[in-house]
Amino acid sequence: MPGCQGCPQSRNSFERNADLVVALAGNANVGKSAVFNQLTGVDQIIGNWPGKTVERAEGTLQYQGMKIKVIDLPGIYSFSTYSMEELVSRDFIALEKPDIVVNVVDATALERNLFFTIQLLELNAPLLVALNQIDLMERKGISIDYQRLEEILGVPVVPTIAIKGKGISELTEEIIKLGEQKIAPPEIKYGKEVEQRIEKLISLLGKIETFYPHRWLAIKLLERDGEITRLVEGLDSTDGTVVRAAEELAEEIERIHGEPSGVVISAERYKIADEISRKVQKIRTEEETLTDKLDRIALHPILGYLAAVGVIGGLLVWTFILGSQISGILQNALSSVEQYEPVVSGPLGNIIWNGAFTGFVAGVTLVVPYVLPFYIILAVIEDSGYLTRIAIMLDRGMHKLGLHGKAIIPMILGYGCNVPACFSCRIMETPKQKFVAAFLVSLVPCTARTVVILGLVAAFVNIWWALALYAFDIILILLLGRIAFKVVPGESVGLIMEMPSYHVPSAKVVLKQTWARTKSLLWVVFPAYVIGSAVLQAFYAAGLLNPLNDILSPVTVNWLGLPAEVGILLIFGIVRKELTILMLAVIFQTTNFASVMSPVQLIVLALVTMIYIPCLALILCFAKEFGWKKTAAITVFEVTFAIFLGGIVFRMLSLIM
């Protein structure tokens, strides 16, 4: 289309290859993923949006001989362009023009959800509303006149209970019907002062060609949306007449209402949402629900924090207890395989058997026993509705780091494994918050580093020094997080989270969530373990490890006060942290480390291992998410900082121990 060179992407960038393309849009925690799973079943592809770190879920529905492609857009609350998720959702609807947009709405929070519905209507999207969770709505004493809501909005409304599959067939039939009729949605009209200025801008925008609807562009210009303003400037052939007019009209609105124009327009949307809700919704006064009773504890200014700490601590303790049992069983089973002679002999056989196979064994004995139970239990807590309460309780503290309460989710995941925790930082709204959260996640002691702390310090010094290392790590995360917030450029935004009701977790949802988090380990962690172990075994076969110890001795011996042989441990530890323990036993031919190293040396080695870049798998994860430049910066900083801190701690402890 001529004159649309400034559009963010090409209209043909999405491969349609289907009779209908349906986009699912809505707030977070409204059951959108449940609708997606019911529509698409097992025929799903999970990946990233091109050029973005935002997850993309795509599936196919075959119905009545038609092939329907379903796209699950990120859960968002508005099109305010504060986050990558909002930009992805907005541009897909406006530029790719799906045949139908299914707006999944939480029936228990109609007014708040309609705020987003109104914005979808502004985008001129061919809309269908799936009014979900009507069972919870009824239990809360709420009733909605679906037919009246349909008449007011001018779009089809289908009640559903997606997690149970109810209403999905009716929703599918409405999708096909709407796809055949191609009915344009009605326009939502605002107050007189705002509406008059929208009309003036629409007339000025008439000569500008763009994929975005002119009415929506006019509204965003009045809201002073920076990206849309730059887009219109690039397309305006009248030397900025439209943008200048938009600025003047926005100032007129502000003079009339005494508020920023963006706030005024948001207030108009909320007013309409409130009016619609009052017309179609009735709420019965009922006795206090179980959710209300539990929230008196979960959100209490004192008990809430104690409960959050208790649940997180219990999650970690239970994971380690259960994990150690499963790990022992797997280790015994795999040790019988390790006793066989390798099929290939010589150096190549050692590289394959002692290197690659050992890496595979380490992956199995770490991921399966520790990470898998951790994610299962975490998914149960999340699906029950309590994890949201933890995030809200910790929101104020996270603001000190430039983050918000949702950052606690990847931080907790980091205690299982830093790799999926890094991937989960995608839930943060801005690039700055994602990067800072991922940086802090890399400092969280995962199960492999916990093995080192317990195996070196708790076993041969005492448990209190091991706990002191954990406490020191938490303090370090807080301090470095505060510094990173000040240093890293970009913006941070506040927390907007849906507060779902408590309910019994669904086994299907828990297993799907666990698989979604664990699969990244299969594609990233396992290859890194296997390949990295083989490479290091090749170094050993070539006789390169002793020269490396000599090269590193100024750091290990002179600065850190450790034996010279420890140098290669720092190299092996980049591949797998638990190799620090294994290699130490091989080097000194003993598992009684107190006989070859002093308590100060054991504490320093554990401290350095805990802080410096966790593992090769996380380095690859960082590179995928943030590029090699930022990955190199984090790696160099953490290695340098760990060594510097280790030398300081060695000198301080030598004075008192």
Image (cartoon, helix red, strand yellow):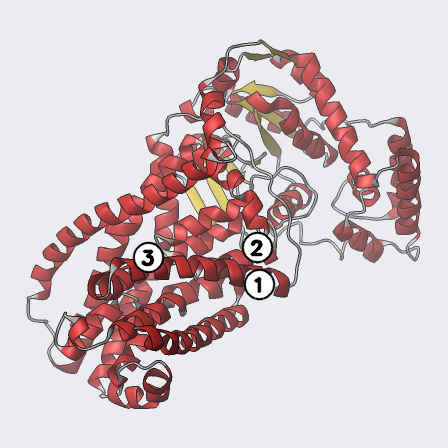
Residue that label 2 marks: 401
Label 2: few (<14), some (14–19) or many (≥20) C-alpha neighbours in 10 Å = many
The answer to whether residue 310 is visible is yes
Residue that label 1 marks: 484
Inter-mark Cα distance, 1 to 2: 8 Å
Inter-mark Cα distance, 1 to 3: 25 Å
Q: In this view, does 559 lie above or below 179?
A: below
Residue that label 3 marks: 467
Where residue 397 sits in the image (x, y, percent)? 55, 48
Look at label 1 and name its amino acid.
Answer: Ala
The answer to whether residue 177 is visible is no
Label 1: few (<14), some (14–19) or many (≥20) C-alpha neighbours in 10 Å = many
Q: In this view, does 562 lie above or below 286?
A: below
Residue at (81, 26) in percent of width and height: 189
Residue at (82, 45) in percent of width and height: 221
Q: Looking at the image, which residue sits at the far front?
A: 656
Q: Position of 599 compared to 55: left or right?
A: left
Where residue 405 sits in the image (x, y, percent)? 53, 44
Look at label 2 and name its amino acid.
Answer: Leu
In the figure, residue 552 lies in which quadrant?
bottom left
Q: In this view, does 210 lie above or below 184?
A: below
Inter-mark Cα distance, 2 to 3: 24 Å
Where residue 586 sits in the image (x, y, percent)? 16, 75
If you read the primary sequence from the N terminus, does the residue marked by circle 1 or circle 2 appear first?
A: 2
Look at label 3 and name its amino acid.
Answer: Leu
Residue at (88, 34) in percent of width and height: 257
Residue at (10, 56) in percent of width and height: 332
Secondary structure of residue under mark 2:
loop
Image marks 1 and 2: residues in contact by CB distance under 8 Å = yes
